Amino acid sequence: MSQRIDYNQADPLAIKSMMALENYVHQSGLESSLCELVKTRASQINGCAYCLDMHTKDARKAGESEQRLYLLSAWREAPFYTERERAALTWTEALTLVSQQPISDELYESVKQHFSDKEMVALTMAIVAINGWNRIAIGFANVAGTYQP
């Protein structure tokens, strides 16, 4: 498999816009470990090999344990995640799979117990960003394994 186009070269402004969103997320105050879990989980759902490779490498470099990364797809059954992380993963799955069922008030309120209004916006924007990156990477066939932190 080879990358279909170099989208950064084809339209640098488009990627600059995505990077602005990514920079907002990085500066939002959310824990980087939480963001990496969110990015990895959304990428698992979307089947984005490039982003899975990238974000598991970034997470490991930042000190995330192998065990937590290995069990992320089964996080509900694993005891290794905090209540805040569980809330973020619930929100990640709901927004990533939004076409499958609506976001209920009950779901929102359960997640909101762990995040301020500002953090809810930041978390949502992190999920928007990774879902966008997944679609870019999948659509243009980014080659998994080429990313180096």
Image (spheres, rainbow, N blue to C red):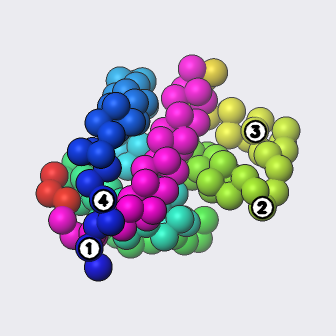
| Residue 43: image location, x then y, percent | 46, 61
Residue at mark 4 to residue at mark 3: CA–CA distance: 38 Å
Disc with the residue nearer the chain's start (4 vs 2) = 4
Which element is circle 1 on?
Answer: loop
| Residue 143: image location, x then y, percent | 27, 69
Q: Residue at x 53, y 65 (%)?
A: 46
Q: Residue at x 53, y 44 (%)?
A: 127
What main secondary structure does the magenta stretch of the protein show? Answer: helix
Amino acid at circle 2: Gln
| Residue 94: image location, x then y, percent | 69, 52
Residue at mark 4 to residue at mark 1: CA–CA distance: 9 Å
Residue at mark 2 to residue at mark 3: CA–CA distance: 16 Å
Residue matched to label 1: 2
Q: For the residues carrying marks 3 and 1, which lies nearer the camera in this image? A: 1
Q: Residue at x 77, y 36 (%)?
A: 109
Residue matched to label 4: 5
Residue at mark 3 to residue at mark 1: CA–CA distance: 40 Å
Q: Is residue 34 above or below residue 45?
A: above
Disc with the residue nearer the chain's start (2 vs 3) = 2
Quadrant of res 14: top left
Amino acid at circle 3: Tyr
Residue range in magenta is 118-146
Badge 1 crowding class, 10 Å Cα cut-off, few under 14, some 14 to 19, many 20 or more, is few
Q: Which mark is residue 63?
A: none
Amino acid at circle 1: Ser
Quadrant of res 8: top left
Badge 2 crowding class, 10 Å Cα cut-off, few under 14, some 14 to 19, many 20 or more, is few
**129 relative position to 31: left or right:** right
Residue matched to label 2: 100
